[in-house]
Amino acid sequence: MMSQERLVPAVDPAEFKFALGVCMAAASQKGPYTNPELYGFSDGEQRYQLTDNAMSRGSLAVIEQFKDREKSMSLMMRISGSVLV
């Protein structure tokens, strides 16, 4: 029997439309965006960082706009599954 809990939480259609606009503006470099190459981590031996590409710029812009981690991840799951693939 499947759980009734949603794997990807529902989002408001107006928020999705806004998030899509934020994502597309950053992806196409037509709006303010943070350079994804500024983000990364080190395992002690090597540094890993994001690549400055459309998907990274768009994702980072949505994450910065929607401070709620669950909401931003839910929005990006929908955007990446429909537009950025």
Image (cartoon, rainbow, N blue to C red):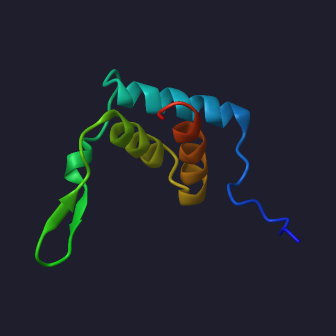
Residue 31 x %, y %: 35, 25
The correct choice, above or below, for 36 with respect to 41 in the image is above
Residue 9 x %, y %: 70, 54
Q: Is residue 35 left or right of residue 69?
A: left
**The one of 76 and 68 positioned closer to us in this rendering:** 76
Q: Quadrant of residue 33?
A: top left
**The one of 20 and 83 positioned closer to us in this rendering:** 83
In the rendered image, which quarter contains the N terminus?
Answer: bottom right
Q: Residue at left 85%, top 65%?
A: 4
- Given the current orientation, which residue lies at the most extreme front position? 1
Q: Residue at left 53%, top 30%?
A: 83
- Given the current orientation, which residue lies at the most extreme right position? 1
Q: Residue at left 15%, top 65%?
A: 47
Q: Quadrant of residue 78?
A: top right
Residue 22 x %, y %: 47, 31
Q: Is residue 11 left or right of residue 39?
A: right
Q: Is residue 71 left or right of residue 31?
A: right
The correct choice, above or below, for 15 with respect to 21 in the image is below
The correct choice, above or below, for 77 with respect to 49 in the image is above
